[in-house]
Amino acid sequence: MSAEYDSNPHPALAHLRENHRVYDWTEQNAWVITRHADVDWLLKHAPVGTSDRHWRDALTAGGTHDSAWDRLRRETITFKEGKEHLRLRKYVSGAFTHAAVERLSQKVRSLVEIALDHAEDRGEGFDLARDLSSRVPIRVLGILMGVTPEMEADFCRDAVRLQNAINPLSDESALHEADLGADGFLELIGELITRAKANPGDDLISALIHHDSGEGRLDRTAVIGLVTSIIMAGAESTGALVNHGVLTLLRHPDQLQKLQADPRLMRTALEEVGRFEFPTKFVTRYPLEDIEIGGQKISAGELVFGSPGAANRDPRVFDDPDRFDITRPLGPTLTFGAGAHFCLGASLARVEAREMIGQLIRRFPEIEQAGEPQLSPHFNIRLISSLPLRLGEGAPREHYQES
């Protein structure tokens, strides 16, 4: 949980991966697994659940809170399992197909252009986390949900409140804010649902309400749960990927120059960024029965953390894994998870990262760091809260637009 770990977790993860295949993290009363084969098995094949109702220590950890936030989060898709989880994914997956996401790409591109226009007009004091990567994903989700311009400020405020509550290191005031956010979010989404019932649009909420998968239509609670899931997973993690991606490119100027010279490398560059500096620390699972990994028995109901970041640098799977190479052939990374709970919004996150990183480095070819990144304490994300950049002289508009 230290700032030193968040700045560079890889030596610690490499030590665990090679010396403690299944690590007994006594402070958290949990197990940690770091090898690619083990994390991949945990996500794809292990008899495990994702809901903390399976956690045997839930009662002592305060798992019985009945707050507005807690009731809301338990309706999210993360807490749904088996047939119910598959049923809900069937409803929402159409919104995140490659074709559907590409239709959103022009709106994403426009939001990024506007943010960078403001940065260029201001001339100095640009902070990647503050001015771009924390703003664009929230607004994209608002567009996806059909949030009207007059609703946007409330939507952004309540979405941020909900995201802060995901962090167990947050204080009581953050949890109070989460309850306020949950109440406000329920009211706002309720208004969108009412509007979508009366006048369906091309937004996600309209699609969820009016779609019939053959098993009937979703009720109001299920729609709210799915929308909350997307908000919780679709903004902060995307912003973190962009922040770490830009920072990694700046620290590897040869790779940055290669990408600036050939934007066609963006696809492999994004996959390599996710592999090399994956910002999420853990995925969480609860065995439904006793399991065994590397000769270590893990009992049903215990807490297991899998580390995708460690798995993505496993030398058993990736050649020279500590080398950052944007031309590296695509491999079996676990950046967006795997198995039944593979990230629904992965394609949207890639489009957003593509636009934010791509426009930034092409529009400002002289970009460089103007200060060290600031990381905020977070249980599950290496959260860069500030990354000052010196943009330099902007390229001619026709150059970066054609790219």
Image (spheres, grey):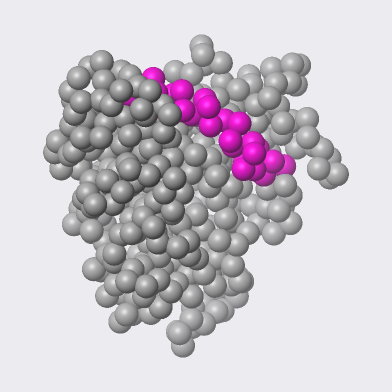
Direction from residue 21 to residue 51 in the image, left or right: right
Give the magenta-colored segment's residue range: 91-116
Does 210 appear in magenta?
no
Residue at far bottom of view: 295
Seen in the picture, residue 18 relative to 347 is either above or below; the reply is below
Q: Can I make out residue 62 in this image?
A: no
Residue 17 pos. (x, y %): 34, 75
Residue 6 pos. (x, y %): 25, 54
Q: Quadrant of residue 45?
A: bottom right
Seen in the picture, residue 224 relative to 63 is either above or below; the reply is above
Task: In this rendered view, identify the residue nearer to me: 260 or 79.
Answer: 260
Q: Can I make out residue 398 in this image?
A: yes
Residue 304 pos. (x, y %): 46, 68
The tally of labels here is 0
Residue 135 pos. (x, y %): 38, 28
Seen in the picture, residue 332 relative to 122 is either above or below; the reply is below
Direction from residue 191 to residue 298 in the image, left or right: left
The residue lying at 68 percent from left, 25 percent from top is 202
The residue lying at 17 percent from left, 39 percent from top is 369
Direction from residue 78 to residue 281 in the image, left or right: left
Q: Quadrant of the N terminus?
A: bottom left
Q: Quadrant of residue 338?
A: bottom right
Q: Quadrant of the C terminus?
A: top left
Residue at far left of view: 371
